[in-house]
Image (tube, grey):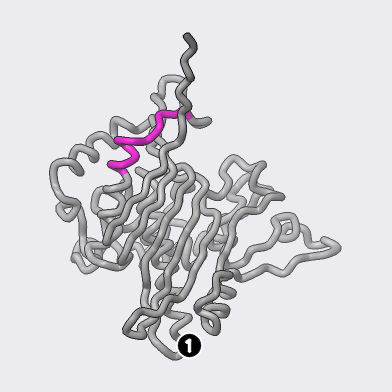
Amino acid sequence: MSQTARVRSIPVISIEADCLPEAWEKAVLAVWDNGLEVRTQYDRPHDPPSRDATVMITVTDPFKEPRIHKNFPGGPEELEAYRQEVVAGIHDHWIDPAAGKWTYTYHERLFSYCPVEQIRSADSPKPFSAVDQIGYIIDYLSHAGHSRRAQAITWMPTADPQTDDPPCLQRIWCRIIESDTGRWSLNMNTHWRSRDLYKAWFMNVYALTDLQRTIAEKIAEKRGEPVAVGRYVDISDSLHIYGSYLDEAAVEVEKMRQSPFTERSWQTTHPAFEMMTLEAREKLARDPDWYARPRH
């Protein structure tokens, strides 16, 4: 008597939360409990399998307080440096593939997308002009807020498949929605091919929602009417907790099970958070290179 083999599949998980700390905790717990155990190309011989899932996370109000999780692997200084890296491009000068340095930043791909070989080749016969994709989103939605065409991409087929660290963020999509009361809000979706849930997700989303806020403000300026920050949707093809730090994550998981996320969260007005963020801004203003973080 033959038996049909059970087909293993990547779980598909949907999560909804009101704010960023709640979303991160719900996602960690969901992938911890339901993620597929699977090995990765980064594993060391003794590492256990990672836990992995395809996940869509909806944050209904990205700027609702509390906005900061105290226990994500990092701190206010790292958070501010990463925010400025994505939104303001303070680390774009680290891009230098020929010297073995970064091949991209999200800011460069979003605000100045241009084929790498054209950027580096002064004698190129057909140089491409860099494309400000965020500027395009702002301009397009300012006069056609209902459009479904306002998107920005990061993937570069001529360069990224050959690198050791290709972009995780793939695409940003935005649309303006009018409420029943006549107020406008900017909805944003981001799509990621791969994501370190435990160590990178919170920093990623903190920065991307700040970019959402920036886009909404600039559209409001062009339209001459308020545009609020609407819901944020985060889609990851592979959202994972690496086996190499399951023991570290397990400590945080137990806290999440035993008490509400609000016990591990800060409002952005918390004195400690404000002080450390201000110090980070002062350091970055003097020297953008003071914080050399690992690539997320």
Query: What's the residue at 48%, 19% (across, down)?
Result: 4
Q: Residue furthest front?
A: 1
Q: Callout 1: few (<14), some (14-19), or many (20+) C-alpha neighbours within 10 Å?
A: some
User: In the depicted view, which residue is nearer to us: 129 or 229?
Assistant: 229
Q: Is residue 31 magenta?
A: yes
User: In the depicted view, which residue is nearer to us: 132 or 14?
Assistant: 14
Q: Secondary structure at mark 1?
A: helix
Q: Is residue 58 left or right of residue 136?
A: left
* Magenta residues (range): 28-39
Query: Would you name the residue on which mark 1 appears?
Result: 223
Query: What's the residue at 42%, 69% (across, down)?
Result: 187
Q: Residue furthest bottom?
A: 224
Amino acid type, mark 1:
Arg
Q: From what the image shows, is residue 198 above or below residue 275?
A: above
Q: From what the image shows, is residue 268 above or below residue 94?
A: below
Query: What's the residue at 45%, 36% (across, down)?
Result: 10
Q: Is residue 271 left or right of residue 7?
A: left
Task: From the top left corner, tell me how far across and down residue 129 is, in percent.
Answer: 72, 69
Query: What's the residue at 61%, 51% (across, down)?
Result: 103
Residue 285 visible in the picture: no
Residue 15 visible in the picture: yes
Task: From the top left corner, tell me how far across and down residue 120 is, in percent.
Answer: 73, 57
Q: Is residue 277 left or right of residue 12?
A: left
Q: Residue furthest top?
A: 1
Q: Is residue 2 magenta?
A: no
User: In the depicted view, which residue is nearer to us: 12 or 114?
Assistant: 12
**Exactly how many numbered labels are in the figure?**
1
Task: From the top left corner, tell me how far across and down residue 155 is, in percent.
Answer: 61, 53
